[in-house]
Image (cartoon, grey):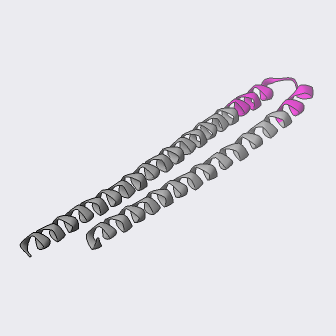
Amino acid sequence: MKKIILFAAFIAAVSFTANAQTVSKKVEKAEKTATVQKDKAKECCKEAKAECKDAKAECKDAKACCKDAAKMAKAGKKECKAACKEACKDAKVASKDAKACSKECQKDCKKACKDAKGEVKKAAKKEVKG
């Protein structure tokens, strides 16, 4: 009888260990997925910030062009000013778009992290229950 009880306890221990390992693997997978999503979002934000920086530089160049236009003869001044104004306007739009993209990426990043934490918690709860 003792042998049967010991054998049953051994089977239960092996089963529990196997379940714990499976859950641990699921937790690891969820954490890896979260890290990958977070890295992708960070890269997107980095690109958006670079685009925003480029747009600001374009706007700065356009403003410098406008200053130069003010020094030009009146005939060419109007054309140059109009072109500069358009370039600056485009740059501001690009800058605004880049900022919006950056905000969207940050939201995605936070959501991915939150989702991953949820997966990790679920897996941990299963491990405790198992």
- Residue 68 picture location, percent across and down: 76, 25
- Residue 127 picture location, percent across and down: 29, 66
- Residue 107 picture location, percent across and down: 53, 58
The residue lying toward the viewer, choosing from 9 and 123, is: 9
In the image, residue 95 lies in the stretch drawn in magenta: no
- The answer to whether residue 17 is left or right of residue 6 is right
The residue lying toward the viewer, choosing from 51 and 56, is: 51
Residue 10 lies in quadrant? bottom left
Q: Is the magenta stretch mostly helix, strand or loop?
A: helix
Work out which quarter of the rendered image holds the N terminus and state it.
Answer: bottom left
Work out which quarter of the rendered image holds the C terminus and state it.
Answer: bottom left
In the image, residue 77 lies in the stretch drawn in magenta: yes
Residue at point 87%, 23% (across, down): 73
The residue lying toward the viewer, choosing from 23 and 103, is: 23
Q: Residue furthest left?
A: 2
- The answer to whether residue 81 is left or right of residue 102 is right
- The answer to whether residue 128 is left or right of residue 105 is left
Residue at point 83%, 23% (across, down): 72
Q: Is residue 111 above or below residue 1?
A: above
Q: What is the span of residues highlighted in magenta in the rendered image?
A: 61-81
Q: Is residue 111 above or below residue 98?
A: below
Q: Is residue 127 above or below residue 81?
A: below
Residue 63 lies in quadrant? top right
- The answer to whether residue 70 is left or right of residue 78 is left
- Residue 111 picture location, percent across and down: 50, 60
Residue at point 29%, 59% (across, down): 18
